[in-house]
Amino acid sequence: MTAFLEQLVTDHLITTPFGAQTTAAEVVTGVDLTGRRAVVTGAASGIGRETARVLAAAGAEVVIGVRDLAAGADVAQEIAPRSGPGSVHATLLDLTDQASVRSFVEAWQGPLHMLVLNAGVMASPLERTKEGWELQFATNHLGHFALATGLHDALASARGSRVVAVSSVGHVNGDVLFDDINFDRHPYDPWAAYSQSKTANVLFAVEASRRWASDLIAVNALNPGRITTTRLGRHIGDISNSPATFEAGSTDVSWKDIQQGAATSVLLAASPLVEGVSGRYFEDCNEAAPHQPGIRRGVAAHAVDPERAALLWQVSIDMLAASPTTA
């Protein structure tokens, strides 16, 4: 990208009054979500839990998709508002099990106004689903892809719904490995697998935004920032060669607590400030500029390439069609 084009893009970035230290609750101060329905994946802990809590506190009916239904029910009870119209309910959803995703979709009735694709795993040791899919790609992208496309009609019926894909600054480290997505031939690298899955989140937003524009479905992706205490990084200690690029030299992105980490998700799901915005990538509650080498910020060109986005969409459809639980 030329310097002129970079400046042109930067001049037209969407900005808000909020920033890196804004909390999720502050983003929706004064916003009434009464009558709106939301689904948040990965809401049993971390920023997913805070996202669900804040949306419900603003009046939304929130469904959290969880693998452990009993534990999810406890979380729902803990974060549900003590007064007001908002509520939180737990429903079984295992993103690595396409039969579970299909059951969730088939059970859904009525419109869906907000879908927050938050669940994820990071830098896990090599593990495969029963289809042979690499776990990080299967969880972070394919499960969410199946969920979002399965709920398309519910999103369309809301006439102004929003889909939020939680990506990561880690996407700048690598494109989708279209020639070997499941690491069948390449030596498995947990960080390369993580990077491609997070790039896939952004590419999904780009293509879904294009495909679903006439349905008034806005789709955006985001980097939540580096969160001090979540379960996402639980596998990092198992990896002896965790890349220096993950932390080294990164004075440009500050650490956040969970309340701040959930802010950009809540902004894209519920704030009137981004009404009608679609196909973008945000960080720190503002649209991100193009990534610059050596800086752990911004959106990489490979993650917003429309041809890659269209290719990933077709590859995802083909992979799901080949699964015995979705065929």
Image: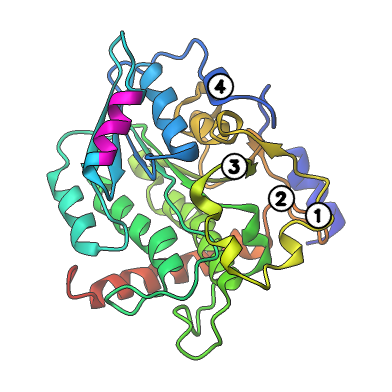
Crowding near the residue tagged with mark 1, few <14, some 14–19, many ≥20 C-alpha atoms within 10 Å: some
| Residue 180 left/right relative to 58 | right
Circles 4, 1 touching at the beta carbon (< 8 Å):
no
Q: Nearer the viewer, residue 300 or 190?
A: 190
| Residue 298 left/right relative to 250 | left
- The residue located at (68%, 30%) in the rendering is 15
Q: Where does the magenta region start and end?
A: 71-78
Q: Which mark is residue 224?
A: 3
Please state the horizontal and vertical placement of residue 103, each as a whole percent of the image: 15, 53
Crowding near the residue tagged with mark 2, few <14, some 14–19, many ≥20 C-alpha atoms within 10 Å: many
Please state the horizontal and vertical placement of residue 152, each as a whole percent of the image: 28, 47
Q: Quadrant of the N terminus?
A: bottom right
| Residue 192 left/right relative to 125 | right
Task: List the residue tagged with mark 1.
Answer: 295
- Name the kind of residue labelled 1 in the image: Ile
Circles 2, 1 touching at the beta carbon (< 8 Å):
yes
Task: List the residue tagged with mark 4.
Answer: 27
